[in-house]
Image (cartoon, helix red, strand yellow):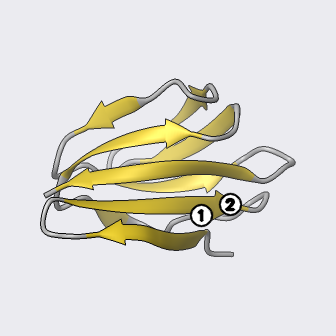
């Protein structure tokens, strides 16, 4: 199933999106057009399916990370519970 994306704010400077993943949900493969920051709302592990590899990423509630434009991946919730985060894209 597809993760649920809810846009909270979208203006000329940023897009803020809340992502919610039921167990097994995924984003589908995509490429980020902008630099972005992720703020986890849940602690757990997500599987990142990259063009050339797959890796597990452990996230902690409130411990943010940043990534650059051009990042390509599919994100999958491998937990047995809902996982959510806020994504802030910098335009």
Residue at the spot 86% in from the left edge and 47% down from the top edge: 80
Q: Position of residue 13 (x, y in %)?
A: 15, 59
Residue at the spot 58% in from the left edge and 43% down from the top edge: 47
Disc 1 to disc 2: CB gap under 8 Å: yes
Where 64 falls versus 88 (above or below)? above
Q: Spatial distance from mark 1 to mark 2, Cα to Cα?
A: 7 Å
Give the quadrant of residue 53: top left
Where 49 falls versus 27 (above or below)? above
Q: Nearer the viewer, mark 1 or mark 2?
A: 2
Could you tell whether 90 is left or right of 52 in the image? Answer: left
Q: Which mark is residue 12?
A: none
Residue pointed to by mark 2? 21
N-terminal of the two: label 1 or label 2?
2
Residue pointed to by mark 1? 26
Q: Position of residue 60 (x, y in %)?
A: 62, 25
Where 41 falls versus 86 (above or below)? above
Mark 2: secondary structure: strand
Give the quadrant of residue 42: top right
Could you tell whether 90 is left or right of 88 in the image? Answer: left
Q: Quadrant of the C terminus?
A: bottom left
Mark 1: secondary structure: loop
Residue 88 visible here: yes
Mark 1, Cα crowd under 10 Å, few <14 / some 14-19 / many 20+, is many
Q: Position of residue 11 (x, y in %)?
A: 21, 70
């Amino acid at each position: 199933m597809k993760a649920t994306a809810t846009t909270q704010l979208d203006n000329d400077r940023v897009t803020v999106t809340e992502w919610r993943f039921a167990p097994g949900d995924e984003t589908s493969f995509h490429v980020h057009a902008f630099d972005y920051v992720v703020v986890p709302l849940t602690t757990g592990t997500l599987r990142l399916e990259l063009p050339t590899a797959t890796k597990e990423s452990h996230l902690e509630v409130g411990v943010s990370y940043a990534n650059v434009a051009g990042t390509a991946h599919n994100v999958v919730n491998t937990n047995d519970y809902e996982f959510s985060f806020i994504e802030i894209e910098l335009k």
